[in-house]
Amino acid sequence: MPAVQSTYSTQTAARAGMLADMQEGYNAFSRVVETAAGLAFGKPVQRGAADGGCKAIGDGSATTFLGVALRTQSRDANNGDIFAQREDARIADKGVIWVTVGATVAAGDPVYYTTAGVWTNASSGNVLVANAVWDSSAASGAYARLRLK
C-alpha cells in the first residue's frame, strides 16, 4: 500500500499567550474586554472600569494588574490574535505562559511591563509583576516563558 502522507510541516513550538507547560498547573478566569482595539494574546491585562471588565495595558489608564491574556483555539481566525472589545478574555494569574519580550531577558530575571504593555526585565520606569520570573532566556522580539507564581 502506498504512503498516504510522507511529508509533514513543522508545528510552531510557541505562540504568544500559549501555556508553556502544565507541570505545576495554572489558574485562569474570564473578564469582558473594554479596550476598543481589543486585547492581544500574551499581553499584560489590567482591571477594567466596570465590574467583570478588563483592559489592555497602555490604553491610558493605570489600574490593577490582573494577569496575562491566554491564547484560545476557539477564536475566530478572522479576528487575529486578539480578544475583541466586549468578548470574554481568558486571563492567567498563575502558570507558565509564552510571551513576546521587548528586551533581552535571562532566566531568573524579574518581570516588568512598560506603560505601553511591553514585557521586559528592566525596572526603570516600568511596573514590577509581583511573584513572577522569567523562566527562559530570549532576545528582544522572541518568545520567552513567563512564570506567574
Image (cartoon, rainbow, N blue to C red):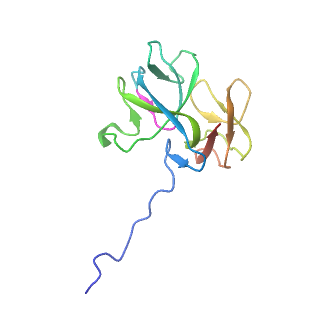
In the picture provided, is 30 more to the left or to the right than 98? left
Quadrant assignment, res 149: top right
Residue 134 picture location, percent across and down? 68, 42
Q: Is residue 41 left or right of residue 25?
A: left
| Range covered by the magenta-colored residues | 38-42
Main SS type for the magenta part? loop
Q: Residue at x 35, y 23 (%)?
A: 86
Q: In this image, 76 relative to 136: left or right? A: left
Q: Nearer the viewer, residue 135 or 38?
A: 135
Q: Position of residue 98 (x, y in %)?
A: 55, 45
Residue 40 drawn at (x, y percent): 45, 34
- Vertical position of residue 113 compared to residue 98: above or below: above
Q: For the image shown, how many numbered marks are present on the structure? A: 0
Residue at image position (44%, 64%) is 10
Quarter containing the N terminus: bottom left
In the displayed structure, would residue 75 be above or below residue 139?
above
Q: Judge whether residue 123 is colored magenta.
A: no
The answer to which of 107 and 120 lies nearer the viewer is 107
In which quadrant of the rendered view does residue 118 lie?
top right
Q: Is residue 41 magenta?
A: yes
